Image (spheres, grey):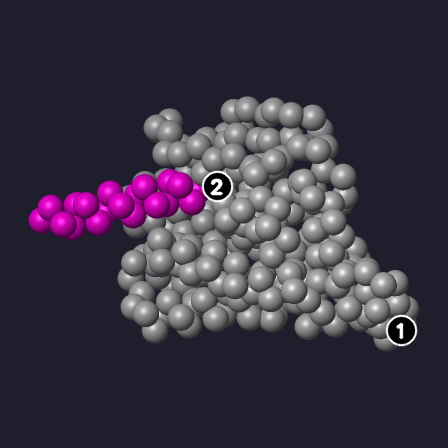
Amino acid sequence: MRLMGYEHDLERELGYAFQDRKLFEEARTHASYANENGCVCNERLEFLGDAVLELCVSEILYSSRGDLDEGGLSKARSRLVRETTLASWARAIKLPEMLRLGRGLECQGGRRNQSIMADAMEAVLGAIFLDGGYEASMDVVTGLLYRMEQIVSPDLRGSDETGVKDAKSALQEMLQAEGDKPPVYRLTKRTGPDHAATYEVEASLSDGRVLAIGRGSSIKTAEFAAAKQAFIAFSERKRGRRRAR
């Protein structure tokens, strides 16, 4: 994923810079605007983005929720890709205010329509897939899960049926269950210009041992990335100890 060269606020919110500007404009274009202006709308991208989102979320769940069977995975996925979730993502990245809507729909309050928000979110993911490939799509979806504190983690206890909890809380609970103190997060590096900086954060135990390093477009995102990596490493270590018994 490219972290620099954002030309639009939406790209900055996504943490992704489009190479194909036509794809970017198409993703933001509702059918009502296209009909009035004779351009291409985002409905085909929405179709593609729906599949991309489902695949990304499926891989995240498959990799991180070894405790769930097929039925549990399907249930968790359906909650993460449903309309209300996508609309919340769209609002978080200010997508509604950046959509191109027809005059009539604008007057009817189309920017507040949950279905329009969710469809546009899928269209944006479809555009990212065509522009940057699957890896870029995964980066953006994972980043949105971090941002909304919906990171999916294995071996969660006390969470709702989706198994969704923010990575920092999950790591802290696991460490405390092992008799350790909460992790310490320390900013170790900042690179890039102010408008497109990349941060590097270490997650360490209270005795100074480094658990993991995370990177992101903000300190908070980098902390969540470090927490996720540390959580996965601890989970694997625990599973290894159980298998060795």
Q: Is residue 151 magenta?
A: no
Give the label, 1 or 2, closer to the camera: 1
Residues 129 and 118: in front is 129
Quarter of the image where one finds residue 101 = bottom right
Q: CA distance from mark 1 to mark 2?
A: 42 Å
Q: Which residue is mark 2?
A: 225
Residue 46 to residue 9: above or below? below
Q: In the visual, does 106 lie left or right of 232?
A: right
- Residue stretch rendered in magenta on the structure: 227-245
Q: In the visual, does 7 lie left or right of 45?
A: right
Mark 2 falls on what kind of element? Answer: helix
Q: Is residue 238 magenta?
A: yes
User: Where residue 136 sits: x, y (%)?
Assistant: 54, 45
Residue drawn at point x = 85 percent, y = 72 percent: 105
User: Where residue 97 sits: x, y (%)?
Assistant: 80, 58
Mark 1 falls on what kind of element? Answer: helix
Amino acid marked by disc 1: Gly
Residue drawn at point x = 71 percent, y = 62 percent: 42
Q: Which residue is mark 1?
A: 104
Q: How many marks?
A: 2
- Quadrant of the frame with the N terminus: top right
Main secondary structure type of the part rendered in magenta: helix
Quarter of the image where one finds residue 46 = bottom right
